[in-house]
Image (spheres, grey):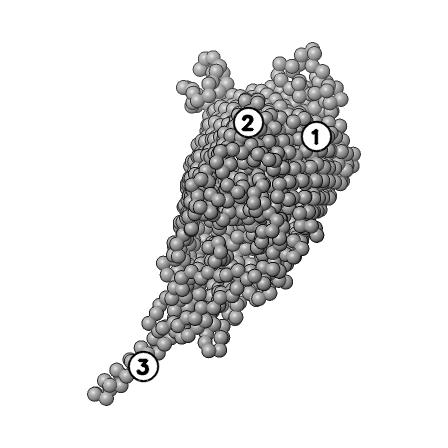
């Protein structure tokens, strides 16, 4: 017994000894640049065991320089930290068995003079540099007018496009979020960033595909990337307070004001922004050729918001809240030609709309790392909106082109003209309609997501739970009245007069629960399994009440907006125009994928299987039904990246996605709420399936400041859903029915090239595009049994070319571009045309003596080759600004801004599809001038920031200083 006890003790001691020797330890720390103390993002951190320097573990630092190595055994090691442009640093480590964690603190890397000699320039900063799959733009290489916001800088970036709604595309990919120093700015909202971030705070702009929270934490791509624009704040501005404030008044009763106050200290950010204007946030148009901008109305906006972000080794917090108000007044005229099986139909319309929208949004983000194995991310957000709108419209349909009879048919759309002796369009009228409506709506939404990840070993095995919840509650009420008249006696239809009160409350819920497991199966090779369950519920109940005169209720009711449904009209509910719909949706998503990571390439491929069950409860008039649908979708995906070097890579992606038609489209019911546009369901609709493929290549030569980028995209859709439209010649009305169709596809290619010349003050930028669209649709037909399929194709060739000279006080750019379209219509060859737009112009920024700057740009935009003569015109657009800095450190600026000096800008858009062509014109804000006062609040920054401001380093206007514009003039070493 005694021997047994001694043996047991010895066994336990041996077990504890072995356990202690195999106990694993985590190593964490942060890597920064020694000169600037800025984080070294994506620095390579390796742990080498001694004495043989064998590789034990490795990782790349995150965007803030933090790293946490996988757990290793106790022993003696060498920590190796390398970063391009800096000397490699070695840190000896002795990890003892009684440790659970080793924090090495902050590791500062010294600049590598030899490497910098090969990777720097001694003149102006390069426009674009490439770091693996990241494109980086130097702000100082693109001068903007004094006080400009981010939008004006983005317009100048090679390959960047901003449409009239403020959506940004860079090299064909839409930017989904804006970030500041790696942290989301106002939830990443792109439009908020474009309109409120001043150029003078930005050092560099980086664009890259940001991985989802799941992919970033697990290290396994899930295909849910989003293109982001990440802004790096200028050195010295992250150590105190800085900001801008401006106020402006102008002609045509225009005004504008902006406020931005920031406090950036180490890893903490705080921003307060505010703005108010009635100029559609218009700024100077960046040089680059023809841009026939559509203002599409007059809009006054007011905005106030606050944003914060902070970070420690274990915890990241961020969030924002913002209030927005907009008041939009839009007028538009439209004329269209619809292609029928026999002949054409013509329509003209006028519309007026006044809408006021109030919105409040708040979002929050928490990422917590309670230990080295666990990561928790929580993202809740909330929004409330209210809108009031009033609209009026006049429209008419004609047997032949009304422009053959009168110069402007839109002058004869009002009902006071109908059937009068002086109506010049009486013989060709088919129908006419006048309508007016007022709408008030309220919306409330809230959602949240929680993600918990746990690493199970240091080889990549981990498990992740992700849950989401969302709730929406919308309510609207509308008063409307309309009168539709049919002029063809063969139609046998009398006037259709309606006065209605409509309520449309809706509610929806959405729950998801997702479990992801990653299993290493070989060196740097992982299997990923994911199961996701989703439940969605939505309910809508549209009630329509007639307000027409009723013998039992006396006189016609003259309604005023906001009065609500008048007493006694509750029984006038129109069941044919009212409906109730309730959806219950269950989705299972089973995904399996393989991820292979090698030094030169990465390959990720997988497939997602999605069984779905949907139940629709529907009531409308005499229809009371419950419809159930079971479908099985699948979605394959491939993502392959090959890295030729640090600055050159090739990437190919493929995504296949199935989509189902809406349940209401599958019901054989009719919706005649608009007598001229009746809609029917189609129980025979099939699901559609889309194939999307992308190919991307980029490379960069730092010595020559020369970069190239190529991008190709192909999208094809099987069984895409379009409309089969039956046209009634007598009434001019249509009955629309969804149908499947094949043959829709489009392809796009881009090639970008930018380089500095031998004299680095001269740069050239070229951006070429080709796009081909094959659009298939059914012609408007006169029979429900026959559909004629028509194909329209468009080949677009585009080229943008500009050259720039820039020194420390003068910048001059010449630019030109052309977009050539080959438009072909198979069944309507008379509509074939080859329109093209071209433009050429110049822009300059000059730093004059006495702290004065002059900025101006002039571009001639031209259209040619259109059938509509009014479209073939030139627009010479000239904008100018002169600004004077004053007060200590040039902290204040007064400027005079003049837009569209020659008053030639118009607001016209056109489209050609397989079933119609149309042209629309809008009211807008074009020619005006403004006097602006601006004040920079950088005086509260640290000593370095204040010194740079006095030297012109933060002025944003390219002002001359001892070190050149923005501190980047001749002789400065620019590292990239």
In primary-sequence order, the first of circles 3 and 2 is: 3
Residue hosting label 3: 14
In the picture, residue 860 is in which quadrant? top right
In the picture, residue 112 is in which quadrant? bottom right
Quick one: SS at disc 1?
Answer: strand
Q: Residues within 10 Å of mark 2 (few under 14, many from 20)?
A: some
Residue hosting label 1: 875
Residue found at the very far left of the displayed protein: 2
Viewport quadrant of the N terminus? bottom left
In primary-sequence order, the first of circles 3 and 1 is: 3
Quick one: SS at disc 3?
Answer: helix
In primary-sequence order, the first of circles 1 and 2 is: 1
Establish if 497 lies above or below 122: above
Q: For this view, does 13 lie left or right of residue 880?
A: left
Q: Nearer the viewer, mark 3 or mark 1?
A: 1
Measure how far apart labels 1 and 2 are at the Cα level. Answer: 25 Å
Tell me residue 432's x, y (percent): 64, 21
Tell me residue 821's x, y (percent): 74, 40
Establish if 848 lies above or below 18: above
Residue hosting label 2: 931
Tell me residue 692's x, y (percent): 62, 52
């Amino acid at each position: 017994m005694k021997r047994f006890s001694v043996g047991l003790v010895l066994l336990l001691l041996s077990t504890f000894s072995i356990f202690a020797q195999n106990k694993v330890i985590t190593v964490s720390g942060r890597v920064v640049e020694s000169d600037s103390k800025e984080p070294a993002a994506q620095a390579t951190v390796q742990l080498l065991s001694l004495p043989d320097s064998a590789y034990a573990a490795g990782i790349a630092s995150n965007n803030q320089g933090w790293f946490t190595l996988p757990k290793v055994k106790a022993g003696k090691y060498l920590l190796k930290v390398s970063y391009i442009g800096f000397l490699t640093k070695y840190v000896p480590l002795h990890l003892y068995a009684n440790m659970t964690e080793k924090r090495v603190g902050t590791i500062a890397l010294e600049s590598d003079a030899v490497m910098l000699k090969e990777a720097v320039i001694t003149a102006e900063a390069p426009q674009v540099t490439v770091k693996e799959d990241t494109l980086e733009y130097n702000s100082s290489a693109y001068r903007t007018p004094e006080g400009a916001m981010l939008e004006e800088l983005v317009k100048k970036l090679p390959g960047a496009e901003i449409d009239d709604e403020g959506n940004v595309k860079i090299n064909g990919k839409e930017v989904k979020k804006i970030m500041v120093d790696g942290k989301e700015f106002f939830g990443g909202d792109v439009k908020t960033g474009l309109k409120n971030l001043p150029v003078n705070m930005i050092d560099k702009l980086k664009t890259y595909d940001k991985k989802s929270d799941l992919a970033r934490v697990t290290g396994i791509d899930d295909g849910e990337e989003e293109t982001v624009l990440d802004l790096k704040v200028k050195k010295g501005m992250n150590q105190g307070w800085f900001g801008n404030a401006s106020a402006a008044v102008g002609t045509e009763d225009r005004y504008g004001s902006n406020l931005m106050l920031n406090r950036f200290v180490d890893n903490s950010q705080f921003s307060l922004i505010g703005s108010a204007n009635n100029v559609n946030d218009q700024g100077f148009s960046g040089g680059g050729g023809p841009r026939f901008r559509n203002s599409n109305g007059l809009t006054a906006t007011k905005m106030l918001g606050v944003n914060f972000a902070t970070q420690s080794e274990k915890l990241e917090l961020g969030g924002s809240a913002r209030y927005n108000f907009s008041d939009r007044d839009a007028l538009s005229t439209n004329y269209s030609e619809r292609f029928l099986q026999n002949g054409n139909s013509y329509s003209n319309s006028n519309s007026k709309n006044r809408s006021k929208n109030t919105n409040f949004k708040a979002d929050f983000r928490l990422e917590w790392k309670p230990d080295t194995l666990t990561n928790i991310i929580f993202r809740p957000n909330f929004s409330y909106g209210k809108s009031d709108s009033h609209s009026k419209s006049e429209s008419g349909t004609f047997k032949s082109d009304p422009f053959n009879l009168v110069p402007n048919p839109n002058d004869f759309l009002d009902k006071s003209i109908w059937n009068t002796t002086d109506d010049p369009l009486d013989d060709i009228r088919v129908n006419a309609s006048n309508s007016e409506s007022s709408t008030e709506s309220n919306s409330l939404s809230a959602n949240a997501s929680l993600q918990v990840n746990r690493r199970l070993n240091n080889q990549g095995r981990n498990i992740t739970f992700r849950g989401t919840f969302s709730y929406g509650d919308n309510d609207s009420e509308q008063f409307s009245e309309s009168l539709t008249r049919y002029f063809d006696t063969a139609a046998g239809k009398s006037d259709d007069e309606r006065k209605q009160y409509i309520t449309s409350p809706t509610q929806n819920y959405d729950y998801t629960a997702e479990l992801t497991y990653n299993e290493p199966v070989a060196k740097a090779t992982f299997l990923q399994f994911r199961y996701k369950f989703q439940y969605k519920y939505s309910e809508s109940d549209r009630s329509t009440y007639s307000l027409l005169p009723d013998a039992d209720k006396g006189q016609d009711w003259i309604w005023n907006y906001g009065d609500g449904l008048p007493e006694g009209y509750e029984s006038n509910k129109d069941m044919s125009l009212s409906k109730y719909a309730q959806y219950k949706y269950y989705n299972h998503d089973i995904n399996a994928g393989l991820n292979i990571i090698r030094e030169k390439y990465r390959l990720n491929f997988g497939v997602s299987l999605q069984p779905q069950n949907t139940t629709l409860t529907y009531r409308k008039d005499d229809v009371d039904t419950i419809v159930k649908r079971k479908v099985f979708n699948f979605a394959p995906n491939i993502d392959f990246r090959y890295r030729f070097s640090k600055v050159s890579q090739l990437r190919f992606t493929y995504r296949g996605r199935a989509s189902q038609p809406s349940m209401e489209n599958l019901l054989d019911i009719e919706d005649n709420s608009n007598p001229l546009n009746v809609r029917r369901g189609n129980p025979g609709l099939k699901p559609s399936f889309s194939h999307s493929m992308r190919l991307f290549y980029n490379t960069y030569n730092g010595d020559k400041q020369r970069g190239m980028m190529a991008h190709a995209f192909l999208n094809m859709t099987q069984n895409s859903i379009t409309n089969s439209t039956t046209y009634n010649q007598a009434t001019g009305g249509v009955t629309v029915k969804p149908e499947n169709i094949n043959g829709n596809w489009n392809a796009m290619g881009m090639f970008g090239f930018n380089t500095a010349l031998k004299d680095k003050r001269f740069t050239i930028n070229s951006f070429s595009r080709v796009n081909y669209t094959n659009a298939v649709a059914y012609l408007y037909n006169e029979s429900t049994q026959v559909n004629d399929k028509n194909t329209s194709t468009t080949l677009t060739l585009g080229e943008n070319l500009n050259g720039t000279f820039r020194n420390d006080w003068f910048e001059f750019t010449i630019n030109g571009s052309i977009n050539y379209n080959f438009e072909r219509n198979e069944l309507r060859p008379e509509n074939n045309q080859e329109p093209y737009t071209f433009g050429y112009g110049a822009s300059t920024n000059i730093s004059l003596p006495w702290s004065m700057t002059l900025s101006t740009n002039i571009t001639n935009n031209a259209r040619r080759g259109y059938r509509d003569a009014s479209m073939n015109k030139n627009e010479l657009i000239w904008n100018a600004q002169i600004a004077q800095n004053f007060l200590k450190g040039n902290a204040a600026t007064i400027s005079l801004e003049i837009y569209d000096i020659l008053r030639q800008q118009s607001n016209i858009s056109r489209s050609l599809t397989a079933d119609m062509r149309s042209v629309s014109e809008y009211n807008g804000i074009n020619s005006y001038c403004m006097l602006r006062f601006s004040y920079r609040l950088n005086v509260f920054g640290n000593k370095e920031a204040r010194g740079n401001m006095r030297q012109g380093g933060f002025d944003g206007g390219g002002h001359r200083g001892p070190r050149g514009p923005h501190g980047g003039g001749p002789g400065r070493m620019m590292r990239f």
